[in-house]
Amino acid sequence: MTAPVVPTRTSADLIRAEEPVLAHNYHPLPVVVASAEGAWVRDVEGRRYLDMLAGYSALNFGHRHPLLIEAAHRQLDRLTLTSRAFHNDRLAGFAERLAALTGLDMVLPMNTGAEAVESGIKVARKWAYEVKGVPADRATIVVAADNFHGRTTTIVSFSTDETARAGFGPFTPGFRIVPYNDLAALEAAVDETTAAVLIEPIQGEAGVVIPDDGYLAGVRELTRRENCLFVADEIQSGLGRTGRTLAVEHEGVVPDVLLLGKALGGGIVPVSAVVARREVLSVLRPGEHGSTFGGNPLAAAVGTAVVELLETGEFQRRATELGAVLRDGLTGLVGKGVVGFRARGLWAGVDVDPALGTGREVSERLMREGVLVKDTHGSTIRLAPPLTITGEELTSALATLEGVLRRDS
Ligand SMILES: Cc1ncc(COP(=O)(O)O)c(C=O)c1O
């Protein structure tokens, strides 16, 4: 039997086709990706682009890393889903290795980042009632302004981004918002009802905002002293991106609860996890929390392969070495269209001179030159290439940015 002829649709056709049938909750760059390998993607017409966003760090190991694809294929041929009603033969190994990688004790497997955050909030509240002794329904969680932890109703309840919140109330109570990178404000907000301090060690969506040295260690010290949990959301900052397995390692800090996602799924399947000290995750008992897909064998197989890649240290090393190239390149652009930047490892928020356009406009110009990035707020763009990118590819992306900024200055 001959295969049916599929009418070829151009990128423009496909973008037009989305309009009436897809919810308009995103405003993607007008590029329609059809295939990818390593740091490169190809659109429907065959044009190549260097991916300098890497799925918001979900693609830390590049597109279709051969060892991750092999692990997924092997698992697809054997067992894909059991639900947690039964055990599966991949989950124990995944949890053991992830706990060992992070220096913590127990793993609660989930799927998306927002689910890990929601789960972390539930665990912290339960710990507050059962272990700390906070009166029922009085637990508070202290969070930072300009945070981004996901999109669920509870999570947007403590967002300070009105676009993320407007129209979605009523909101979940129990959160106190303090300025980021301000230990005095944090200390003032913590009291006997505090279950946890929940922060991003580096605020990604806010524009790769890096706190002062000593802030994370200060959060660790304060939470220990005040008997509340330090919950670090490393969903974007973790798993090699900053040059360490975890961004908190830059300050030698081990949180009580670690939230992981994105790159844990190797760019193949959604895999997230709450990883915590035994005393904390032990508060969960059967029936109190769960997910049909969390900890499924395919996710566990891919997640294990991700942990194996990180165990080699190669990706953390690359992020450090190439991070120096990124930093040098961006330093050279300051005053040439770049007004400032913040970078750690292979991750940077770049503030472009607003006179040259919004972050979106700069992203569109870069796209036309074959480089994909994402704007955040105003005139800030974010660079987070796969950790597999080569020095030459990175240098060429920086040269493209320089050209885009020069041409329009
Ligand atoms: C720090 C952080 N937490 C949570 C999330 C939510 O992850 P997901 O989109 O997988 O729900 C994100 C996503 O960008 C994030 O950057």
Image (spheres, grey):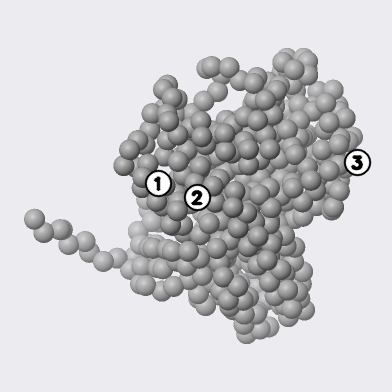
Q: Is residue 170 visible?
A: no
Left of 405 or right of it: where is 47?
left
Determine which quarter of the picture holds residue 45: bottom left
In this rendering, is residue 162 above or below 97? below
Find out whether the residues at labels 3 and 1 contact each other: C-beta distance under 8 Å: no
Residue labelled 2 has its Cβ within 8 Å of some atom of ligand 1: no
Mark 1 residue type:
Ala
Per the image, label 2 sits on a secondary structure element best described as loop
Where is residue 376 drawn, in percent x and y?
Answer: 64, 59
Q: Position of residue 50 (x, y in %)?
A: 51, 70
Q: Amino acid at mark 2?
A: Gly
**SS for tag 3?**
helix
Question: Residue shown at 33%/38% (left/top)?
Answer: 78
Q: Is residue 253 left or right of residue 406?
A: right
**Disc 1 on helix, strand or loop?**
helix
Residue 68 vs residue 212, the one in the foreground = 68
Residue bearing the label numbered 3: 184
The residue at which mark 1 appears reads as 72
